[in-house]
Image: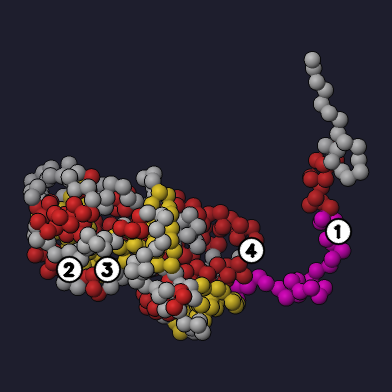
Amino acid sequence: MNTPQSDNNKIVLAYSGGLDTSIIIPWLAERGWEVHCYAGDVGQGAGELEGLEEKAAATGAASCKVGDLREEFVTDTIWPALRALAVYEGKYLLGTSLARPILAKGQVEYAREVGAAAVAHGCTGKGNDQVRFELVYQAFGPDLQIVAPWRDWEITSREDAIAYAEAKQIPITATREKIYSRDRNLWHISHEGGAIEDPKNPPPADAWMLTCDPMQAPDAGAEVTIGFESGIPVSMDGQRVDPVSLVERLNAVAGAHGVGRADILENRLVGMKSRGLYETPAGTVLYEALGQLRALCMERETLRLAEELGPQYARLAYYGQWYHPAREALDAFFQTAMAPVTGTATVRLWKGTATAISVEGPGSLYSDDLASFTMGAGYDPKHSEGFVRLFGLPGAVERKARGFAIGSAPAPEPATTR
């Protein structure tokens, strides 16, 4: 249903000022809605947020609120996902996935503030974001009517959307020649659409924005040291930094060395494969640093379990289930497991690569006495003989039973019945 279902015709639109949400305002108004816009600042940059209230009003919105969600975005979603070292399908650091729960929650809060009966979003019927937004609506505003224009209107492509905007005299930045769809926040920027959609096309050089071409990066490289407390970043190069500033500074430093690019073919939640270019400079460095520190401080079996649960955490975040009890239960595990992961890691940045080169911390489980090739008092090599025999016992018994021992007679062939 895309029209008001009661006398209350107020609706709050998740608004970015981009092509899709700009044309949704007049489309909703034509169907009887009083449109209020909510834009969450998750670090898109001043260029995207500047004049947003005026633009929304000029397009027909009754109000527009821009909420500063940057610190909440970092501390409530980015840091927990980082602590879990959550990566979707081995490459995606969840930049868009982590922002959506915070944006949708802020939108529901604004709907309560203006007394709206409905919420709307500009997500397409093919994407993951429709799920991410609507699961949050279900969690925090189950009474609100949901309007998703891309599932109802006759617009079927970005070219159609541009034509609609031109007909309604709505100012937009997208063009038919350069038609990338971008999503930017503190953690990353994604690029989709246009020539990017075809996997056989190399990444267009004009798509990248946060990172320089690794081939053009400085020859000298650079090093950056990150301090962590229980798996959470707290400092950069020995200076304690607030969460937002740490990500911003690290983005600038790593991006200047071409660090953080990814060309990803991912499996969307709704079933198809899609291709996107992602830039996550700060995230790439932090994952490398924390991974090395975790290896230093976490006990073996706990580490193995963390390695298994990290991808599950990533899937829940990617699928929009941030407020799901399973994700919250996994978060409790990682909060406990990462408690001793405190210390610093130094990462070398060089022509698109980020490599941890040193790590230390009070929670270190590394023992020079045990690890050294020099036999120390903490390890008696005589004990290893019995250990090796017992460890290999199941395999040895199996091979003996099957007649596989070297020099033994081959096992008899099974009897056949004619």
Q: Within the magenta stretch, is there residue 328?
A: no
Q: Nearer the viewer, residue 229 or 124?
A: 124
Q: Residue at x 55, y 67 (%)?
A: 291
Q: Are marks 4 and 2 in contact (CB under 8 Å)?
A: no
Task: Give the secondary structure at mark 2.
Answer: helix
> What is the CA distance from the residue labelled 4 to the residue labelled 1?
24 Å
**Which residue has dot 4 on it?**
299
**Depicted 79 relative to depicted 198: above or below:** below
Q: Is residue 41 left or right of residue 51?
A: right
Tell me which amino acid carries mark 1. Answer: Glu
**Which residue has dot 1 on it?**
385
Q: Which is nearer the N-term, disc 3 or disc 2?
A: 3
Q: Residue at x 82, y 73 (%)?
A: 375
Tell me which amino acid carries mark 4. Answer: Glu
> What is the CA distance from the residue labelled 2 to the residue labelled 1?
72 Å
Q: So how many labels did they put on this image? A: 4
Per the rendering, the mark at residue 52 is: 2
**Which residue has dot 3 on it?**
41
Which portion, as a residue range, is magenta? 361-388
Which numbered disc, 4 or 3, marks the residue closer to the eye? 3
> From this viewpoint, is residue 62 visible?
no
Across and down, in percent, residue 47 comes to 23, 73
